Amino acid sequence: MNIIANSIFVDNQEEALQFYTDILGFEKKVDEPVGEGFRWLTLVSPNQPDGAQLVLEPNGNPIAGDYQQRLFEANIPITMFGVKNVQQTYDALTQKGVHFTVEPTTMGSAKMAIFNDTCGNLIQIVEQ
């Protein structure tokens, strides 16, 4: 069994696509209309083009929107991304205007930071 996709809810798919591709560097994998202005929109890491896809899913369902909002208000990241160097990634993303809610810090054996994706989510980066 393999992980093939991970969904995150977003306020606006087009804005999320721009942030995740232009700022974070992900690549669009699938962009198919699925009715009523929504799209099946997935991204992949350029380092793993055949790896798990990140689904940018609209938060129009009240349960999805509530889930997203509650996690954000509780300062809980919706997902985490692995990076080679947290400090370098933090510096590069800060230069691009990304707002971090937690600056690079070490917790146990993990070095991590958390940023706002501008789409209603907090994302954690972890050094691998």
Image: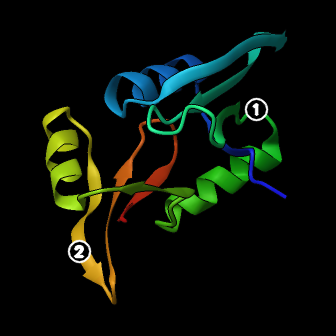
The 10 Å Cα crowd at callout 2, few under 14, some 14 to 19, many 20 or more, is some
Q: Is mark 1 on a helix, strand or loop?
A: loop
Q: Residue furthest bottom?
A: 108
Relative to 13, does residue 64 appear above or below in the rendering? below
Which residue is label 2 attached to? 105
Q: Which of 58 and 63 is in front in this view?
A: 58
Q: In which quarter of the image is the N terminus?
A: bottom right
Where residue 45 appears, as percent x and y from the top left, is: 49, 36
The reply to whether callout 1 and callout 2 are in contact (CB within 8 Å) is no
Say whether residue 60 is left or right of residue 81: right
Say whether residue 65 is left or right of residue 120: right
Relative to 25, does residue 75 appear above or below in the rendering? below
Render colour scheme: rainbow
- Foreground: disc 1 or disc 2: 2
Which residue is label 1 attached to? 60
Q: How far apart are marks 1 and 2 (CA)?
A: 34 Å
The 10 Å Cα crowd at callout 1, few under 14, some 14 to 19, many 20 or more, is some
Mark toward the start of the polypeptide (1 vs 2): 1
Report which quarter residue 7 is drawn in: top right
Q: Is mark 2 on a helix, strand or loop?
A: strand
Looking at the picture, which amino acid does disc 1 mark?
A: Gly
Tell me which residue sits at (76%, 46%) in the image: 64
Tell me which residue sits at (70%, 33%) in the image: 57
Where residue 79 appears, as percent x and y from the top left, is: 55, 57
Say whether residue 35 is left or right of residue 94: right
Q: Which of 9 and 83 is in front in this view?
A: 83
